Amino acid sequence: MLDINTTNFTNPSSFILLGIPGLEAAYIWISIPFCAMYAIAILGNFIILLIIRKEPSLHAPMYYFLCMLAITDLVLSTSILPKMLSIFWFNSREIDFSSCLTQMYFIYCFTVMESGILVALALDRYVAICDPLRHSTILTNPVVVKIGLAVLLRGALLILPFPTLARRWPYCRTNVIAHTYCEHLAVVKLACANISLSSYYGLLVLLLVNVPDVSFITLSYIQILRAIFSLPTKEARIKTFGTCSSHLCVILAFYIPCLFSSLTYRFGHNVPLHFHIITVNMYLLVPPLLNPIIYGVRTKQIRHRLIQLFSHKGT
């Protein structure tokens, strides 16, 4: 039997993830929608990658960014779901200390990367609609590669202090984490030290990522909407707006749950713990689920290629 109340340890060998406290009796039922979401996210993002890779007409900046988004979603969902399902199905709650910090790093790193990719997609739509004649000269393949590297490095470097600081703190209270994954503050709050540095740095990362990203996306779409409404005919306005509506859906699906989760965590002290944990998991898992569906339905080129793919298999 696992000792979940061990005290006076400086470097715990493992943590115990409780899952969703209070809802243990419903784990099987809760696991069904989460498992379905994971399966759809994996299948959908792999299909997006396959279609873009096989269709030469989709070898363009917007679709390269979509490939980055699909890969990010695959890593993000895989960082969370397998361990969560093992808790729900097999009561496998123990996670190695190093594995816990690795999971923490991947979850937050790829969340930051996803935000950066959404900024890149907004930039692509801004140039395509507001300055279409220069689109191919501004967003060249080398520029796309540089943007991708910048997004990767920003996420990797900004989040690196999370596990680095967490590893330095002495742990002498308990090794029990009331969560389904190694959430940053849930881990460092177990330390018997002043964790203000970790707490303030987490808030700094939130501000450094969300404020400039949301501001840039908002300004980009203000200019995009101004350009759309200045078009001479209604048909042209509808057609042009259709090319960026899928991006708006993806942006809303990512940032609205993110805002709700952050506000709930910091100010919703009366919110039940199980509701908060479910909300955070939905925030991390819904975008990987919705992104391929939204782009598959809303993006004409991908939709047509997908129909051709399944029509060919059916003949």
Image: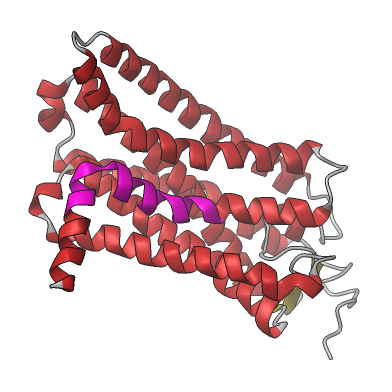
Closer to the camera in the image, 308 or 130: 308
Q: Is residue 101 magenta?
A: no
Instruction: Report which quarter residue 22 is drawn in.
Output: bottom right
Q: Quadrant of the C terminus?
A: bottom left
Q: Can residue 11 be seen here? A: no
Look at 74% across and 41% down and name the residue there: 264
Does residue 18 appear left or right of residue 110 in this picture?
right
Instruction: Report which quarter residue 256 is drawn in.
Output: top right
Using the image, determine if residue 4 lies above or below residue 200.
Answer: below
Closer to the camera in the image, 48 or 29: 29
Using the image, determine if residue 146 lies above or below residue 189.
Answer: above
Q: Is residue 300 magenta?
A: yes
Does residue 266 appear left or right of residue 152 in this picture?
right
Does residue 56 appear left or right of residue 125 in this picture?
left
Look at 36% across and 61% down and name the residue there: 44
Look at 14% across and 37% down and name the residue there: 140
Does residue 58 appear left or right of residue 26 in this picture?
left
- Magenta span: helix, strand or loop, mainly? helix
Q: Residue furthest front?
A: 315
Q: Quadrant of the N terminus?
A: bottom right
Closer to the camera in the image, 153 or 169: 153
Residue 56 rendering spot, x and y as whole percentages: 8, 53
Closer to the camera in the image, 298 or 156: 298
Residue span colored magenta? 285-304
Residue 82 rendering spot, x and y as whole percentages: 56, 74
